[in-house]
Amino acid sequence: MELSIILPVLNEEGNITIILRSVQEVLRTLAISYEILVVDGGSKDRTVELAQREGSTVRLIYQQKKGYGEALRAGFQESMGDYVITLDGDLSHDPQLILTLWAERLTNDVVIGSRYVPGGTVRMPLWRLFLSKVLNIIFTFFLQIPVCDLSSGFRLYRSLVIRTLQFESTNFEALEEILIKAFLQGRRIREVPMHFSPRKMGKSKVKLLEFAVSFTKAFLKMFWLRYFNKPEAPVKQPEDVNASF
């Protein structure tokens, strides 16, 4: 299996059919073997029912623990691809970017769809845009990680790399933890411009208070991880070298 797509969802009946068909249309142009893992966090609507109609390449994973990080963990554990791409299930991420991420795979371990590098754009309420930019600046400055968009969930990972990280976070802070650990391992990280749009249907699952608490916990945890718990870079194994990295 060459590629696994991981799609965390929760009550996305208005978006799930569109996003799955759009992703499959893009993947067919690559002419590669792939699977799409829909990680459901306990939807109460028709999300699961609609996803099950979208063909044999779509596989349902039922998330046992709550949180975005747990959704990623469940997807990573079940994935069979040599590479993994994660994206949101609310149509805020344009599946066409999969082509760009895939094209960068041979010279990078992690490729990030970034809202804040030259060429990237964001469409969201001004208060959310301001908050997002400020938080990313704070993380980047204090953690000294050369990434402009630490919180973007549209990414490609080489599977061998993601399996060595053993991240612990259970919510959105998993995104920052993964990047910090990859950086400390000496992994190659690249950002490519992304166009971010507001969700097409439904309501955002992110609540301001929950986000603020999550950010505070994440920052303290990531600061400690960055400066007081540095893991050694992994020794290159033969299969690591042969994978063109």
Image (cartoon, rainbow, N blue to C red):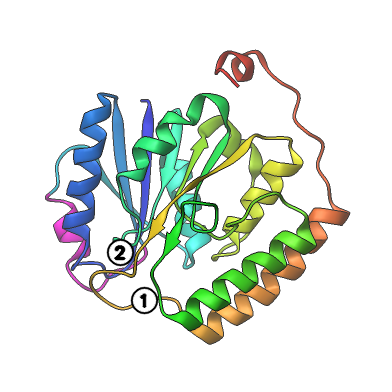
Residue at (17, 67) in percent of width and height: 46
Q: Is residue 9 above or below residue 160?
A: below
- Sequence-wise, the earlier of marks 1 and 2 is 2
Q: Secondary structure at mark 2?
A: loop
Asked whether residue 106 is drawn in magenta, I would say: no
Q: Is residue 217 visible?
A: yes
Q: Are circles 1 and 2 on residues that touch, CB within 8 Å?
A: yes
Q: Residue furthest left?
A: 53
189, 211: nearer the viewer = 189
Q: Secondary structure at mark 1?
A: loop
x, y (%) of residue 126? 46, 80
In which quadrant is the C terminus drawn?
top right
Identity, as a three-letter code, of the amino acid under mark 1: Ser
Q: Which residues are magenta?
A: 41-53
x, y (%) of residue 134? 63, 73
Q: Is residue 38 above or below residue 156?
A: below
Determine which of the numbered discs, if any, sits on residue 233 in the image. Answer: none
Where does label 2 land, which residue? 90
Q: Dot 2 surroundings within 10 Å: few (below 14), some, or many (20 or more)? A: many
Where does label 1 land, which residue? 204
Q: Residue furthest front?
A: 118
Identity, as a three-letter code, of the amino acid under mark 2: Asp
Asked whether residue 47 is drawn in magenta, I would say: yes
| Figure quadrant of residue 42 | bottom left
x, y (%) of residue 131? 57, 77
243, 80: nearer the viewer = 243
x, y (%) of residue 195? 39, 56
Residue at (62, 80) in percent of width and height: 213
| Figure quadrant of residue 25 | top left
